């Protein structure tokens, strides 16, 4: 079976190394006796190989170094952090956002995540929480929470095979089109009208910022 992976480690003196392969939980072992290109292999290279399952695990044979190019893509998963910058990746665009007041803190976090995903973002940075003790008629009836931060797009540079670049470009165009459509759906999110009641982000400012972001992103991908 042909597979692609990234070389994680090469132990030249010992004559073996390991490959990180998408879809496999464990690293793939390789030995110089089964790979004529061993002397050319370096950590970080993208390689193509024949995958074999042995009694000790997976093994790569007949490895070939791929001709690659680098593209920028979103970091996998969703990031919540109190810091202005994530531990990993590069912040390409960010827009301020705040949630309505909720009795449950988790509802506030969920609101920010949902809004960010609708806008095509994959992170909330500088996360902060405001709290209010509320009462009516002299009776305390709960603590309410409002979260704020910056919804952002966090990306990383990834090496891909050059013959996959055209397909990657088509996929990026599809993702951008879907993101623009999601941007329109933000109109259905409740707006934050009063600080003491149900505040929310200003959708008009958000739409303008997102429109600029998608135009710039389209230009960047178009020049890749």
Image: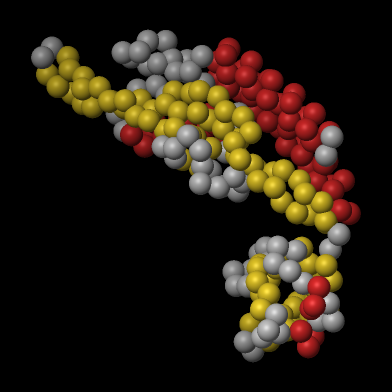
Residue 139's place in the image compared with 167, above or below, is above
Location of the C terminus (image quadrant):
top right
From the top left corner, tell me how far across and down residue 68 is, in percent: 83, 56
Query: Can residue 39 be spotted in the picture?
Result: yes
Q: Is residue 135 left or right of residue 77?
A: left
Query: 58 or 224: nearer the eye?
Result: 224
Q: Residue at x 57, y 28 (%)?
A: 94
From the top left corner, tell me how far across and down residue 208 is, in percent: 64, 15
Q: How many marks?
A: 0
Q: Which residue is drawn at 65% across and 71% down?
A: 9
Residue 126's place in the image compared with 41, above or below, is above
Q: Residue at x 47, y 15 (%)?
A: 191
Query: 86 or 79: nearer the eye?
Result: 86
Query: Which quadrant of the view contains residue 4?
Result: bottom right
From the top left corner, tell me how far across and down residue 44 is, in percent: 70, 63
Location of the N terminus (image quadrant):
bottom right
Q: Is residue 2 left or right of residue 93?
A: right
Q: Which colour scheme is used?
A: secondary structure
Q: Which residue is drawn at 65% across and 68% down?
A: 8
Query: Can residue 110 be spotted in the picture?
Result: no
Residue found at the very far left of the displayed protein: 138
Query: 167 or 46: nearer the eye?
Result: 46
Q: In this view, does 117 lie to the left or right of 40?
A: left
From the top left corner, tell me how far across and down residue 172 is, in percent: 77, 39
Query: Which quadrant of the view contains residue 109?
Result: top left
Residue 122's place in the image compared with 3, above or below, is above
């Amino acid at each position: 079976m042909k597979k692609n992976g990234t070389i994680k480690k090469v132990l030249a003196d010992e004559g073996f190394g390991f490959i990180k392969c998408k879809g496999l939980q464990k690293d793939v072992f390789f030995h110089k006796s089964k790979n004529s290109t061993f002397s050319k292999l370096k950590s970080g290279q993208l390689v193509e190989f024949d995958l074999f399952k042995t009694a000790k695990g997976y093994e790569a044979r007949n490895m070939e170094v791929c001709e690659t190019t680098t593209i920028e893509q979103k970091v996998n998963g969703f990031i919540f952090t109190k810091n202005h910058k994530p531990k990993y990746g590069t912040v390409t665009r960010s827009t301020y956002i705040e949630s309505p007041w909720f009795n449950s803190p988790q509802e506030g976090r969920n609101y920010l995540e949902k809004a960010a995903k609708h806008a095509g973002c994959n992170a909330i940075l500088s996360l902060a929480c405001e709290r209010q003790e509320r009462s009516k008629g002299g009776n305390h009836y709960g603590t309410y929470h409002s979260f704020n931060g910056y919804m952002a797009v966090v990306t990383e540079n990834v090496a891909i095979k050059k013959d996959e670049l055209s397909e990657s470009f088509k996929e990026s165009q599809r993702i951008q089109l879907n993101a623009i459509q999601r941007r329109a759906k933000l109109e259905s999110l409740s707006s934050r009208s009063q600080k003491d009641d149900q505040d929310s982000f200003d959708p008009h400012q958000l739409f303008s910022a997102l429109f600029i972001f998608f135009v710039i992103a389209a230009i960047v991908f178009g020049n890749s």
